[in-house]
Image: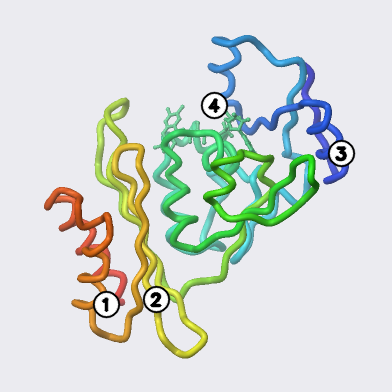
Amino acid sequence: MLLHLPTSVSEVQQHTAEGALPIGGATLAWATYQRDGFPDHVMSLRNLPEANTLGPEVLGAAVLLARIDDRVPEVLRRAAGSIGTGAVRRAATVGGNIVGSTLRCLLPAALVLNARATVLDSAGVYETDLTELLAKRPVLLSIGWRTPLTSGYFKQEADAGGPPPFVVATAVHAGSDGTRQLRLAVRDGYEFLTASADHDGDVDAVLAAVEATDIGALPLDLRDVVRAQIMEVLNR
Ligand SMILES: Cc1cc2nc3c(=O)[nH]c(=O)nc-3n(C[C@H](O)[C@H](O)[C@H](O)COP(=O)(O)OP(=O)(O)OC[C@H]3O[C@@H](n4cnc5c(N)ncnc54)[C@H](O)[C@@H]3O)c2cc1C
């Protein structure tokens, strides 16, 4: 298996056209290769500057989870810090988590930030939303977002190897006309649900708006967790 280490987007494009799949820390890919056979060649983005950016409004796909710190919004930092063990976080990448894993603890955080993905495929480099990213799975170079006013992340305690723990991610965004908007995403099992509601100071109205979405069909104990997270982030 040949490992390409492109240093420019044009090199990534060339390797992609030649059929090289992206690889991050191989924390998942290795087991897949052992089961299905090793590909002829793969491509790591670890030497590509665009995939290694880490800032208040951008996160590169090759950034190791352990490197994600308070330069990014709280929701993203806490999501990254909750993933696996220290050893996993020192090897696994943003791209491998969002595009390649099934748990995708970073995804609810990216959803509430309304993140856009910068990706590459045979059409070249372009920006897309997270839904299309997950449907088409092009090479992810980075995600970007606008800084929210505040954000929060909650992950239920769970035993290793058990069912995926319930996750609630929240972010409050400023609208152009002085209004505020709450964005919320939950992970229930392997399913992701989202909701958003305008916030003019009336917390009960926000809670009612969220309850009117698919989130209102969750079991009562999980809805209680969601309500607590909404009140916590709105009352800051
Ligand atoms: C012990 C353990 C505990 C874990 N706990 C959690 C948890 O609590 N929450 C959670 O969310 N996850 C958890 N995981 C899964 C973890 O998130 C993944 O192992 C990790 O994120 C994969 O990252 P990687 O860089 O190693 O990807 P790799 O294994 O290298 O790649 C995985 C897949 O992603 C694709 N890929 C990689 N980079 C890109 C890219 N830039 N663009 C497009 N596709 C790409 C690859 O082609 C491959 O298909 C756990 C894993 C382990 C081993």
- The Cα atoms of the two marked residues, 2 and 4, are separated by 36 Å
Q: Horizontally, is 33 left or right of 208 in the view? A: right
Residue type for callout 3: Glu
Mark earlier in primary sequence (2, 4): 4
In the rendering, which numbered label is found on residue 181?
2
Of tags 2 and 4, the one toward the viewer is 2
Residue type for callout 2: Gln
Counting every numbered tag in the picture gives 4
In the rendering, which numbered label is found on residue 174?
none
Furthest toward the left, the residue is: 220
Q: Are marks 1 and 3 in contact (CB under 8 Å)?
A: no
- The Cα atoms of the two marked residues, 2 and 1, are separated by 14 Å
**Residue bearing mark 4:** 27
Q: Residues within 10 Å of mark 3 (few under 14, many from 20)?
A: some
**Residue bearing mark 1:** 235
- The Cα atoms of the two marked residues, 2 and 3, are separated by 40 Å
Mark earlier in primary sequence (3, 4): 3
Q: Secondary structure at mark 1?
A: loop
**Residue bearing mark 3:** 11
Residue type for callout 1: Asn
Residue 132 in percent (x, y) is at 57, 48
